[in-house]
Image (tube, grey):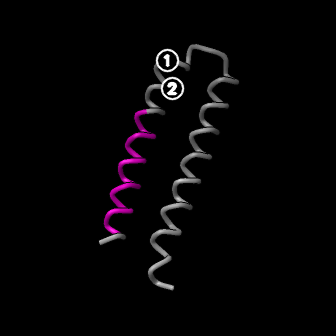
Amino acid sequence: MQIKKDIKDVIITVSILALVIYFVKIHILPLRPTVIIFSTSFILHLFVYILKKTKKKIDFPKN
C-alpha cells in the first residue's frame, strides 16, 4: 500500500514538473538563456531530490 502511494506521489510530481517546464518554455524562453539554464537545473535537482526521497521510502520496507 505504501509503495502504491509513493508511485502516485512520483506521478503527481512528474506531472507538476511537466507543467513547470511547459510554463518555463512559454514565459521564460524569450528571456536570457542563463535564466532558462538556471530554472532547468533547479527543476532537475528538485526532481532528483524527490526521486531519492521516494526511493528511500520504497526500499525501506524491503530491508
Residue to which mark 1 is pinned: 27
Assess whether residue 9 is covered by the magenta stretch. yes
Using a 10 Å C-alpha cutoff, classify the residue at mark 2 as few (fewer than 14 neighbours), some (14 to 19) or many (20 or more): some
Q: Position of residue 57 (x, y in %)?
A: 47, 69
57 to 46, vertically: above or below: below
Circle 2: residue type: Val
Which residue lies at the image location 49% right of the left edge and 25% below the top edge?
Answer: 25
Circle 1: residue type: His
Left/right of residue 38 with respect to residue 49 in the rendered view: right
Which residue lies at the image location 34% right of the left edge and 70% below the top edge?
Answer: 2
Q: What secondary structure do most residues of the magenta stretch adopt? A: helix
Element at label 1: helix
Left/right of residue 46 with respect to residue 62 in the rendered view: right
From the image, which quarter does the N terminus lie in?
A: bottom left
Assess whether residue 62 is covered by the magenta stretch. no
9 to 30, vertically: above or below: below
